[in-house]
Image: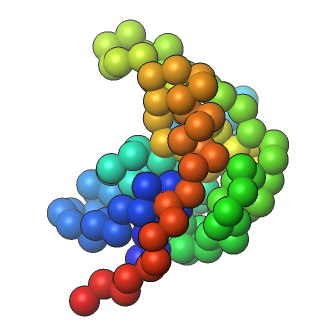
Amino acid sequence: MNKCPFCGNTKHDVGSKSSYFYSQVLDKNSDKQYTHFLCRKCFSKGPGENNENDAVQSWNNVIEHDSEFCPFCGSDEFSVESNNKNKDSPFIYFVSCNNCKAFGPSGCSKNEALKRWKTRDKSDHHPSG
Ligand SMILES: [Zn+2]
Ligand SMILES: [Zn+2]
């Protein structure tokens, strides 16, 4: 499993499978539900896919290691969104990639969300084991 391109977290395989997969209805028009790989450290999410296997594959397919573009697909078509639909959870912002439906780490402000989206973990990848 790849480390998180944003925070470098590699402890993805701890716990049950359901603890690192995340599903969300994104497209209100089609009610299409995507499955994301979720980093539980910075709460970034990999590209939205149809199933868990594809979500893992996309998470491992980091192509942009050092830019402000989407680390998974290289797109610069992204927007800052917030979770203000849900009043019960704390108000957070996050960058959403319009192309592959990936999400950046969450932040307390739009600026923080953008800053964390543009931040790439610089540490070397240590294979688990
Ligand atoms: Zn992370
Ligand atoms: Zn993307």
Relative to 121, is 90 on the left or the right?
left
Q: Residue at x 81, y 47 (%)?
A: 76
Report if residue 44 is visible in the image.
Answer: yes
- Measuring from the top left, give residue 42's x and y in whole percent: 39, 46
Q: Tell me if residue 98 comes above or below residue 83 in the rendering.
A: below
Query: Which of 30/42 is in front?
Result: 42
Q: Residue furthest top?
A: 87
Query: Which of 25/118 is in front?
Result: 118
The coloring applied to the image is rainbow
Q: Tell me if residue 119 comes above or below residue 50 in the rendering.
A: above
Tally of numbered tags: 0
Examine the image and state in which quarter residue 19 appears.
Answer: bottom left
Query: Which of 12/88 is in front?
Result: 12
Name the quadrant of the C terminus: bottom left
- Measuring from the top left, give residue 16's x and y in whole percent: 21, 63
Q: Tell me if residue 107 comes above or below residue 15 in the rendering.
A: above
Query: Which of 37/9 is in front?
Result: 9
Q: Residue at x 77, y 60 (%)?
A: 74
Report if residue 32 is visible in the image.
Answer: no
Q: Residue at x 43, y 55 (%)?
A: 7
Q: Tell me if residue 15 comes above or below residue 6 in the rendering.
A: below
Q: Residue at x 69, y 44 (%)?
A: 97
- Measuring from the top left, give residue 117's x and y in whole percent: 59, 44
Name the quadrant of the N terminus: bottom left
Examine the image and state in which quarter residue 12 appears.
Answer: bottom left
